[in-house]
Amino acid sequence: MSPAYFLRRLLAVALVLWIVTIAVFAITMVLPGNAAIMILGEYATPDQVAAMEIRLGLNRPAAIQYLEWLFNLLQGDFGMSLRLSLPVSDVVGSAFRNSALLAATALVAVTVVAVPVGMLTAVKRGTKADLGISLVAYVGTAMPEFVTATLLLVIFAAPGNPLLPAGGFIPPGESVAGFFNHVILPAGALGLILTAHIARQVRSEMSDVLASDYIRAARLKGLRERRVIWGHALPNSLAPAVAVISLDIGYLLGGIIVVEEIFAWPGLGRLLILALENRDLPVIQAITLLLAMVYALSNLLSDLVIAALDPRVRYE
Amino acid sequence: MNELVRHPTGLVGSVLLSLVAIAVILGPFLAPFDPQAFHPAVRLAGPSGTHWLGTDQFGRDILSRLLTGAGPTVLFGVGATALGVLAGSIIGVTAAVAGGWVDSVIMRTLDGLLAVPDLLFTLLIVTILGGGIGEAMLAVAVAFTPGMARIARSSVLSIRTREYVLAAIARDESRAYIIVQEVIPNAIGPIVVEATIRVSFAIMIGATLGFLGLGAQPPSTEWGLMVAEARQYMYRSPWVVAVPGLAIAVAALGFNLFGDALRDAFDPRRRR
Amino acid sequence: MTRLVANRRQVVIGLAATSALPNMGFAQSMSPKYGGTLKISHSTRIATLNVMQLSGPAEYPCVDMLYSGLTRIQPGRNSAGPDLATSWEANEDATRFTYNLRQGVTFHDGTPFTSADVVATYEAILDPDFGSPARSVLDVIDSVEAVDDHTVQFNLNAPYADLAISTAHANARIVSAAALAGDRNDLETKPNGTGPFMLESYDSARITRLVRFDNYYMEGQPYLDAVEMHLFPDLAAETANYLSGNVDVMLNVQQADFARIAAAEGSNALRVPAGRYVNVVMRQDQPPFDDVRLRKALAMSVDRQLLVDLVLEGLGRPAYDNILSPEFQYAIETPGIPYDPAAAKALLAEAGYPDGIKLTMVASNRPAIRGQVAIAIKEMARPAGFDIDVEAMPHDTYLANVWRKGNFYMAYWGMQPTEDATFNLLLTSTASYEDTAWFNEEFDELVRRGRSTSDPAERAAIYAEAQEIQLRDTPYIIAMYQDVLTASRDWVEGWIVHPLNRVFFIESVWLNRG
Amino acid sequence: MTNSRAAAANGQPVLDVRDYSLAYGTPAGPVEALRNVSLSIRPGRTLGLVGESGSGKTSLAWAIMRYLPANAVETSGELVLLGEDLRTKSLEEIQDLRGRRVCMVFQDPGASLNPVLRLGDQIAEALVRHRALSQKDARDEGEAWLARTGISRPSEMMNRYPHEASGGEKQRVVIATAFACNPEMIIFDEPTTALDIITARQILDLFDDLHDETGVTALYISHDLGLVSRVAQDVAVINQGAIVEFGPREHVFTRPSHSYTRDLVEAVPNPDHRIVTSEPDAEDALLSLDEVNVMYGRGKNILSFLQPKREVVQGARNVSFGLRAGEILGIVGESGSGKSTIAKTLAGLQDFEGSVAFGPRSYSGRHKIDRAYRRAVQIVFQHPDASLNPRQTIGKILSRPLKLYDLVPRSERSRRVRDLLRSVFLPEDYAERFPHELSGGEKQRVAIARAFAAEPRLVICDEITSSLDVSVQASVARLLVDLQQKTGTACLFITHDLNLVRQLAHRIAVMRNGDLVDLFESSQARAPERHPYTTQLLDAVPVPVEASQVSSAAERAP
């Protein structure tokens, strides 16, 4: 791959993010209600509301506010959180780290399970094992995270003899075992739907590969089935699998919102809900921008990986 | 249609969808009890001869609530998808037909919006609109629009280079005729397939919004809300959350399976 | 086991006889053990530690540990006891108060506490631009003066008998003059108080950890080495975590989980009757709520005991529209209102609605109890001819569109420390959150007289009259009082909650682990 | 090879298919694919298996390779390879046999090579598998075979990926792989169909050389009788799953016993048998192109810097020629030569520079083209499946030009549609049908009828016969010429089939890489002043074997 291609892709990501900043800013501008009341809640005294209104100073033209915000943003200054009275970069930064831990764990687990399962079911297409796994996968994709999470809690964290903690977070720096103990349920709730989806997609990609002329040619060369699958089919299915996984990262980033809320995971998702409920505009803006950036960059990364896996796209 | 039912996935999907459709249309009439009526004597009771699926914290009959909740739950998904598809198709077709800088601007904007995860986008919009089932439906529709616009655009673009469209251009047909008569009828297939599968996503997102308190509101019997309301009793009587939770899965599964079968039926390459 | 304390009224509220409280620090047979970390779980975020402005349920225990006030609400009573002030006296007409300050107290950073800190704190509270919630109960103060290093004097603009209770306000804790003179944003995250615990780490998304302050003025206290506040936003997860023994105290317990937690081995579920209530707001400057008969008809259409059973799982008491719960010293014996749909229907017909009336009642979804009460009222009132359409909505939408604007909605209030604070919160014409347009000059005048009267008998008569007026006009329907529920593990000694839910006495808690 | 030699010695056939029948199970019941097929190939000989699409020829190849889908049911017969019935072998035995004793070369080398593996590895793995060579030896051996297939830099080719090689190179790699294990038999399944004319010719020559060299027994499957007549000593004709003709080539061509074979032989275009007899009016110019240039892939807007850079390709370069009324002008060339660009340009579907004069008017760009021009110039596309809107009935499709150009009053339209259907020899009730209910040939007739419905003065035919079966090709070509003669419409006939174009065009234009390199009267095709490229093209095409030539060609067989 040429540096020019990489640069062009990076430019495209920057353009996308710029568009996101406009969209995000526009959205936060039209949020209804008196921001001060929304931030302080109904038990705030009128004094508090008045003080907050002065502090917000949201009475300047939107375009000026946008430019000012963008200017600060480019210097790494996301402003102050209105609800938490801390710099947004601090609040969002630590939440981002925690979310990344959860998302990465889930993604790794999903990949490790889903890709082999998808390939296996494609190879064993039509057998009982395929049917069984496909059925589970179908049901899996139809369960929203909050249902999965709730059922997981009922099954694994029921009081009396809980197998796993019902929620909470322990930084891996504090205790690795504790981290894994706490991450299993949220990662499971987050991963079920993705595992099912990715396994299905990989199965379908792999089935297409297995039905292709070059697999037929390989078989008719007398190659053993093992060599056909591992030597010929697998390398061709990896690139599409990476593409599917990278697209599902978008879904994963949405899924963390609910899962973090249920499992008390101190990440971006929960922070976002708090920010939305409290009209914490700088935090909403930062999170949305951050998630969009992660998604755009993960797509870019997946393109690079695909280029590494498939010689046809290498010199594009 | 035969093609659909012959597929095992299509068959199961059709059966599940029929069940859901029956619940949507006839649910309110089939419900044995008033779904809002309290039966304080039998709060949080397990399944019994009177209350087949048990009762909730107010002693309301879960079966009746489930049956009347099918409407709001499923129609939410269908409505949100329909709106999203309509808006997306209009935008996508416009971009494809206009081409040039109009297309570029529309597509780059869509790229930007698509970079925001669906649920996050929906949450932002529902917060702007202010929560409630109608607002949530609109939000999901808006969140679906960019994706559908993309699909519609690529569908139109692939149709636009078909030879029958070229033939129409060569004949000097009007632009309107080409779009309405030649392009759209043929571009609609992939859009319908995508829409069907998206209904299941819309149902799930709708339920999730209900669960987060931003979608359907009490005393609605929308299934996501039923799960949310019953969650605090989940250890005491697990079926109160399990029943609506599984109902959501069944409805979503039905649309998912049906959509996949539809895709296979449209795509000869995948036909077995 | 459940400690159920449901003594009606009198001075002692929440906690009955001390014999029922073997764990109280001041009444125990065992001598407390030192050391250990107390883990408390809570479900709402600790968004700030700014003592002068915070208002979150989980923020109150934090400032209660970090700071001291001049006075402090006493365990189990709605009365003020000494804290940083050892004593106080008023002049004849209760317009000037002198507080004598404790000597030898230092802040966590080692600087000594003096009257200058008190003056600086109260001046900040009284500054309208600073927006302290405590100002609403302290705005009778005209000026604060330091008489000497350990004496301050408050000059009031009107007679006010309850000043000692007002100075116990959770947001009126003493901050050092230096902190107020410096960057006030530091108050958010770098608290420097005189309380029994100091902040060690603050992660608003997860754990806030406080450690023992060795120079706390109470000799030998606190007993604990540290206290950790663990956040669990999902209530079901919080309960499961508590029951599995990962935390020692659950700050607030849901009604739905209370019985299970009470029955669980090694767990103490504590239930404290309190004056918390959901009230039905009806705007009386517009029809149909301008007609008292309609309001009364609705009041008769609510089966209050059933409501307590359904919504509170029995963990509360029926209320009969009195804004003062029995815990208040001057609360009257409120007559019951029987559930009588037939009579209600007749009264509704009399009010001009023989065929019933269609109404839309708004309920925010946070906390869920608002919606639950609304739905229950809808069902109960149906036989009386009320066709109520419940419109539940997200809390932010409610705040933006309905709160203090709508004509028929559910409000939710915690208990106030005094009768005067309660009336001035909602019911007087100039109340802070006046939302009914129920303006009654006679009532206003009674409240005004009550606050400047120190004689208990006189006050009782005045407040009784005020309550009669309130009950006659039914500005709100208040159908039940909700108990405060908390839980602690067996090894936790001395954990109590106050009906006000603002003071916690954690300096007296100790761990009795084998 | 020893087995094969032994077989040769005792006259035993290498492959003997006896009474073989095959069916596919479908939801609608079993569908017969092969019915009582019997044929045999003697050692060292090439059997040409000829049939149209769907005739079962590929099914037979799969059956021999024992590569049948799960729903295949073999209802009778034996497949005997040197005395052993393949049907009785286990999967493991078959895997040992594939690629070692029986190999296969496929139609599309682009699809049959794994895109993510290097070409060298794809040859070597077969050698490692079947000849137990080490990786290094296998690569050396593979490279040697690549050299034998005429690849100029074999070691470089070994390290390339399929997308880095041309179609011809890829097919050489596939052929090298097939020959490398020294098999007894190779099945060639249309190995040249996906290639350009000249490349196809080179592959065919390679086949001849390697066949002579190794003496391998071959089954050569093709739809092209002309081609088969050139490479095979024996010919079998398969129709609807049954062998209708089997025998030595001379026999099949000179004395076909079955009517289907006769039709097939007749349908092969032969440049010496002209379909068109009349000549156009010499001086009546209808259309002329003047210095027409077409560029592809030019950036269009400011955001295009975000698109991967597209190469600018010149689709047509300074093309000028004229067309007379009533004339049939053939345009030939390989893929990418620009012949379809000219078709699209003249149909008003392609931006161009230069000018196109039509009658009294001249057009200097696509957007200048008006309705009068568009009505007078109609186009018929290559793929009948794609050129008819699948959602419209045939009646609607045919009446559209009538309505658009207001040719006949509304009340007359359905009658006119019926006339049009009759004129292309289709039943009138086809008006009610949808395109998918028609066969490929029928659809192409509808497309032709639609073009002629506009009463045009010029019809552009862009490869209209190339996706059709041989027998259908001939009838469609004849239909076109009939209509053209009847109406006097001029015709631009674009094709890569040189034999066909020589049968029906008055003049032939040759294009290459966007340039018009030659333009000549059909009768002058073999004249000495032809452009060398034209000669090369003409030489590349196998001319159907006439009865008289058969014996001489057969002598070349060993």
Image (cartoon, coloured by chain):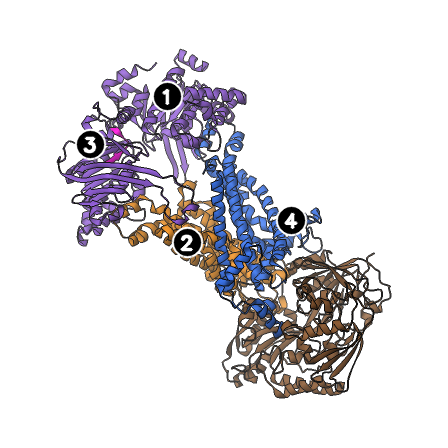
Q: Which residue is mark 2?
A: B106
Mark 4 residue crowding within 10 angstroms, few (<14) / some (14–19) / many (20+): some
Q: Chain of mark 4?
A: A
Give the alpha-carbon distance from disc 1 to disc 4, as whole Å: 62 Å
Q: Which residue is mark 4?
A: A184
Q: Determine whether, in the image, residue B117 is placed left or right of residue C40.
A: left
Q: Which mark is residue D507?
A: 3
Secondary structure at badge 3 equals strand
Assess whether residue C429 is covered by the magenta stretch: no
Q: Which chain is brown?
A: C
Q: Nearer the viewer, residue D220 or D497?
A: D497
Q: Chain of mark 2?
A: B
Q: Chain A drawn in what color?
A: blue
Q: Chain B drawn in what color?
A: orange
Q: Which chain is purple?
A: D
Q: Which mark is residue D207?
A: 1
Segment tinted magenta in the rendering: D493-498
Identified by mark 2, the residue type is Ile
Q: Nearer the viewer, residue B18 or A15?
A: A15
Mark 3 residue crowding within 10 angstroms, few (<14) / some (14–19) / many (20+): many
Res. C471 visible in picture: yes
